[in-house]
Amino acid sequence: MSSALRVPGRARFVLFALPAALVLLQPLAATAGSLDEGCDPLFEECAEGEEAPAQFPDPLEPGNRAVFTFNRALDFVLIDPLTRAYSFVVPNPVKHAVRNAFLNLDAPAVAVNDVLQLEWNDALSSIGGFLVNSTLGVGGLFDAAGRIGV
């Protein structure tokens, strides 16, 4: 059985298909009527009497604005209240343990980065810290490696 997060069908549609449709279809609608708007001074000389457009239109702008508006609304309605409630309700030692667990989850990526940069000692230190914190530190909730000097 996979340990991946399972998303119900409707939520999967909202999370993936709707934003994809906004991003992919809005530029087509925005540029459909504006293909022949005079000369393009970037690629050709403008004929006499023909003015260059005041600005170059961004074909992705409508989609970008829709996604930005959605993100701001989601932040205002859901994310900001959740973070404020988390900060108010959760005690500092628990926040510190959660922070340690996420830092521990980042250790393998740091180790790969160290190997790619040929920083062998740093890579071994990251791997050792990850192994110690994952076992003795209860999945990284506690920084056991820091306490024993790994």
Image (spheres, helix red, strand yellow):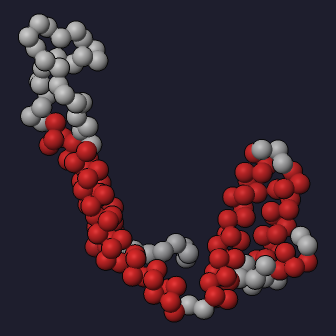
Residue 34 image point, x, y percent: 12, 31
Residue 30, by quadrant, is top left
* Residue 146 as seen in the image, left or right of residue 33: right
Left or right, 102 with respect to 137, comes to left
Tally the numbered discs: 0
Does residue 43 lie above or below 68 as drawn?
A: above
Residue at 69% of width from left, 77% of height from top? 100
Residue lying at 29% horizontally and 50% vertically, measured from the top left: 64
- Residue 146: name its quadrant: bottom right
In which quadrant of the rendered view does residue 48 lie? Answer: top left
* x 62%, y 84%: residue: 95
Relative depth, front residue between 15 and 74: 74
Residue 70 in percent (x, y) is at 28, 64
In the rendered view, tell whether residue 73 sits above or below residue 30: below
Query: For the view shown, which residue lies furthest in the top direction?
Result: 48
The answer to whether 97 is drawn above or below residue 68 in the figure is: below
Q: Is residue 149 visible?
A: yes
Q: Is residue 115 left or right of residue 94?
A: right
Q: Where's the N terminus, which quadrant? A: bottom right
Q: Is residue 126 above or below residue 137?
A: above
Which quarter shows the C terminus? bottom right
For residue 13, say whether it is visible. Answer: no
Q: Nearer the viewer, residue 119 or 15?
A: 119
Looking at the picture, tell me which residue is in the foreground, 3 or 29: 29
Of all residues shown, which one is farthest toward the right?
Answer: 149
| Residue at 79% over, 49% down | 115
